[in-house]
Amino acid sequence: MSVTERYLNAWEGYWGAFSGVPGEAIWDSDPEPAAEAHPALLALPAELPLPVVDLGCGNGTRTRWLAGHFPRAIGVDLSRAAVEHARRADREGLAAYERLDLVDTAAVRALHERLGDSHVYLRAVIHQSDPEDRPAVAAAVAELVGARGRAFVVELEPAAKDVIAEAAGAPDGTAAGASGDVSGGTAVGTAVGTAEKFRRVFEYDLRPAAASGGEVAGLLRGAGLAIRAEGATELAMTGFHPDGRRILLPAHWFVAERAGAPAGGGG
């Protein structure tokens, strides 16, 4: 089984046109000050020092960040172009990167056999996957965590659509709106404006915030995972509202592990 040709071509097209400039992708914000640098995620390596697999790693920004918190980090992505961007950006060799179709059950199983049980980081992948592929994505998470690992999953809420629609329709040109990211309070990055960043998402037929509320929890449970903790959060984007506020998209996070695993991990 594999993803649809439309979905594959959408992501290859997007990453194939990507320049490699940090912050060019609307979701490519600095992980450290962002709300998703959540204590529940950062607690995982202390509970059990397993590798972490970043599913849908894109250009590897978060994979490299995860490598500083986990014993080993592996970024995987459907797009070959994305994997090449991630490798080029990781000049220090902090993590490993490879192509993986999460819907390819045999390939996911082979990765688990090579790595053993791992922690999983899944940021905003299910919500834009084709509906027929979402159960397989959740099953990939369950396969990779195995009996001992845990997954930190964060997905956009449907309300994010309204924020995206407003930002995509706003005029570009403000100093903040034309910057890539903020680090230490200073705007840095690409000159591509906020609205243009969102337009590129739709130009390549990517479909953000397409999952319905409560669907993600059901998918995780359907894959044999138990949700140990969850809560509301926001995902920081690299774009800004016309008044200079950073765009924050409503989201929900989950920590999940194999159902029946002892509380607190291990075993």
Image: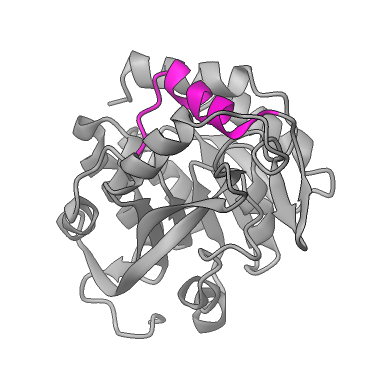
27 displayed left or right of 129: right
Determine which quarter of the picture holds residue 205: top left
Name the residue located 21 percent from the left edge and 70 percent from the top edge: 259
Front-most of 193 and 252? Answer: 193
Quadrant, the N terminus: top left
Q: Is residue 5 above or below residue 228?
A: above
Q: Position of residue 146 (x, y in %)?
A: 35, 62
Front-most of 61 and 95? Answer: 61
Q: Is residue 262 above or below residue 208?
A: below
Quadrant, the C terminus: bottom left
Determine which quarter of the picture holds residue 258: bottom left
Name the residue located 52 percent from the left edge and 26 percent from the top edge: 79
Q: How is the image coloured?
A: one colour
Q: Is residue 71 above or below residue 54?
A: below
72 displayed left or right of 175: left
Name the residue located 69 percent from the left edge and 35 percent from the top edge: 178
Q: Position of residue 131 (x, y in %)?
A: 21, 33
Q: Is residue 59 above or below residue 43?
A: above
Extreme residue toward the right, this view: 92
181 displayed left or right of 11: right
Name the residue located 54 percent from the left edge and 21 percent from the top edge: 14
Find out whether residue 198 is within the magenta segment.
yes
Find the magenta span and give its range: 192-208
Q: Position of residue 224 (x, y in %)?
A: 19, 60
Q: Position of residue 124 (x, y in %)?
A: 41, 47
Find out whether residue 199 is within the magenta segment.
yes
Determine which quarter of the picture holds residue 32: bottom right
Number of numbered discs present? Answer: 0
